[in-house]
Amino acid sequence: MIGRFLALCGWLAWQAGRPVRATPLRRHHGRAVAVVAVVLTILAAVPFIAPQLAPQPRDTAVQEIFDGVVTSTGTWIRLRGRAFALAESPTDEAGSYALLVDEANPLRAIAVRTEASFTDPPESVGVEAFSGRLVEVPVTAPEELPIEATVAGTPPRVVPDRIVELDPVATAERTVLWPLSILPALLAILLLIGARVGYPIFRASKVIDVLAAPLGLGERLPAAFGGRVGPSIRELADPGAALLLVRRGPKGNLLTAQPLGEDGGLAPGPVTIGGSWTAGRIGEVHTVSETVPALIIRSELVNATFLFARTAERDRVAALVAVDR
């Protein structure tokens, strides 16, 4: 499962850098993936940053106005409470007025003025958020209030020298749409992991087919390769076809690799794998869709990963190479 997960990360990074590989900047495809990851990180941060840029009123309570904590004329504030329409103006100025009873302390209230009228009956008035500007003006406390605006018949104390000029539309409280950040943040993490591990994923293995006999003289075995085989170079994500065979050398049998031509073209000459020093490592290559036996071979002319259809085929070739167990 870990190999398949890493393969998925590598595949995403490989796809992100694929457009760059078709340009002269193909050597910098890793940086292109990092740029995409950075862009996704910025997109993930937008839902957190954007709300901070929008101005917000000061959240306060009516008691703070009484205590003198918030008194400056023009201060933009937000109050939560219930607004009960007033039949008469509590000031000398005309307008549509209501008494805003504070949610936190129902025995504290402040008069508010708005261009629209309050039409809800007292029994249906609920707690809402109101935003507006403080205005300094003498206020006369209303003599009669609906029972819903009182506490067991006790009327609230009204701010005597301030009212709130309400905004046409109450400013909503700041919210962070964090679910919008999940997808770009997850993709950025997967791309960074994929850029680190590459694609496909090779994972070493110690499990071998002990019954597999070494490839014999004259035998041929088809395989795919990614890396360098003589003058032929292929990406492991887009492997090329090769034919592995054993031929007789001056000091014994030699393992050779014959890259096959594409589209009917002329195939390069066979490349000797053995003959001097060789090193190998057996394992498996994980892709998004499959897991195949693989053998990494390093020698003077070869630096490639060979892919096989079956584990036994891989181990027959590995028996001819000094591999790490």
Image (cartoon, rainbow, N blue to C red):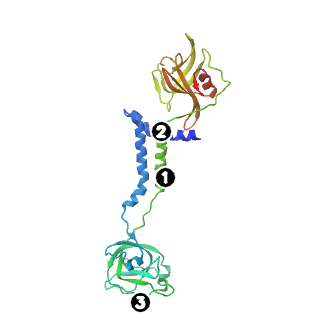
2 or 1: tag closer to the N-terminus: 1
Which residue in the structure is indicated by mark 3? 143
Side of 293 where 66 appears, left or right: left
- Residue 142 appears anywhere in the view: yes
- Circle 3 residues within 10 Å: few <14, some 14–19, many ≥20: few
The label number, if any, that marks residue 182 in the structure image = 1
1 or 3: tag closer to the N-terminus: 3
Residue at image point 47% right, 49% down: 185
3 or 2: tag closer to the N-terminus: 3
Residue at image point 49% right, 22% down: 302
Query: SS for tag 3?
Result: loop
In this view, the residue farthest toward the top is 250
| Gap in angstroms between the C-alphas marked 3 and 2 | 75 Å
Q: Identify whether 20 is placed above or below 150.
A: above
Residue 52 or residue 166, whichever sits in front: 52
Query: SS for tag 2?
Result: helix
